[in-house]
Amino acid sequence: MDALFVFLLFAGFMVVMFSGYPIAFVLGGVAVGFAALGTLLDAFAVEADMASLRMIGFVANRIFDTLSSYSLIPMSMFVFMGLMLDKSGVAERLLTRMHGLLRVVPGGMAVSVVLIGVVLAASTGIIGASVVLLATIAMPAMRGAGYDDRLGLGVVGATGCLGILIPPSIMLIVMGDQLQIPVGDLFRGAMLPGLLLALAYVLYAVGAAILHPERAPARPLEDRRGAGAMLRDLLGTLVAPLLLVVAVLGSIVFGIATPTEASGVGAAGATLIALGSRRLSWAGFRAVCEETGITTAFLFALIFGASCFAVVLRGYGGDGLIEAALHAIPLPPTGTLVLILVIVFLLGFFLDWMEIILIVAPLVLPVLTALGHDPAWVAILMAICLQTSFLTPPVGMALFYLKNSVPDVEITQIYRSVIPFVLIQAGILVLTLLVPGLALW
């Protein structure tokens, strides 16, 4: 009976999800419905501290637990920091100046997009904002320089997704909260794989330009002041965001501040940068606060719904069933880990990273930890794997951000352009799997 209810719970979730309802309400609604059904049939074994709450009571309990979670506070602060930096225009100035300096190098404009994407990733962590901003600014410049659209679209889409892995990442904050792993450990563990991804993108862009010069032609400098003056302008623009990144990530890495404290420093620093650029008005500040509130509310709604779903799943013994099934697979511990990563990768074709983290990761991590795998290493492997969900067709969110930002290209062309970068991400995933020290240094 328990196995049947677990199967029906997941089946109901999948069916209602594809109906188009918001995923947060799908998770919470299906959970409450099955809790009511289990209570009526006396098949739902709620946890001891919720025994008297029954159907709707555990929902309020889950909401209170989520809102009072100290580890989720950085989520809103880092969202605010990213939106405020976008308002300051730092990324736009960096792209313009780096484009002008690197245009003489084969593939130099694509390289500049990757480098600016790393700075954005280390200071925002918001995928939608990064992809749209890079596409809006970089695509016209690359087209004007004669770059092939497939290379340009691929570089912009893949680079914009770096923010989900390179700290401070919203995904890592949610993952740390759900998997009970210190967020600081995840931030440290994700740094090297994230930077390796960026390096691989640079090497691919340069290699493509050397092998096929017509896809990424070099151009002479347009600024008559010369490369020295342009380099000084670039470094001057880089100082403020780099100081902010060092203040936020450095304080976490060296143990000076917790991620929660560092997120407050980041939010305040981004506000000062926007004030210093003279692009922040009271109306702009209010707009940033409102957008931060909406984004944070959306993320918390997903966590509410998934938390309710997890409670009902445990009530039916679903975690035990999944654990028994994984232990029954005739594979060594590494083989089980690889199988789960493949499943997570395939789920990324249809589900967003948030649903996978909130539903799948808490179920499989205890099993993998019991098999002897380091939980932080497993979490970083999942994070790299989940990053591909933003680029893999048919529902990769970065693909739709690109389509909205560059409406004159077909979605099929965008699909083809990101394939090499999905393969690069898979390569870095395999490298981190073979060399755990990349995540556990």
Image (spheres, helix red, strand yellow):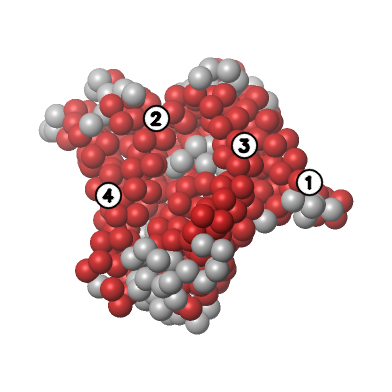
Q: Is residue 121 left or right of residue 391?
A: right
Mark found first going from the N terminus, 4 or 3: 3
Of 51 and 58, nearer the camera is: 58
Q: Nearer the viewer, residue 81 or 202?
A: 202
Q: Earlier in the sequence, mark 3 or mark 1?
A: 3
- Look at discs 4 and 1 and give the one toward the viewer: 1
Residue 75 drawn at (x, y percent): 61, 37
Q: Residue furthest bottom?
A: 408
Q: Is residue 113 above or below residue 377?
A: below
Q: Secondary structure at mark 4?
A: helix
Amino acid carrying label 1: it is: Leu
Q: Is residue 173 above or below residue 296?
A: above
Q: Distance of mark 3 from mark 1, alpha carbons?
A: 14 Å
Instruction: Give the class, few, some or many, for how many residues have Cα within 10 Å of label 1's Cα (few <14, many ≥20).
Output: some
Say what amino acid the circle numbered 2 marks: Gly
The residue shown at (23%, 39%) is 431
Tag count? 4
Residue lying farthest right? 282
Residue 242: tell me if it is visible: yes
Residue placed under numbered mark 3 in the picture: 244
Q: Which residue is mark 4?
A: 426
Residue wearing tag 1: 275
Mark found first going from the N terminus, 3 or 2? 2
Residue 132 in which image quadrant: bottom right
**Disc 1 versus disc 2: distance between alpha carbons?**
33 Å
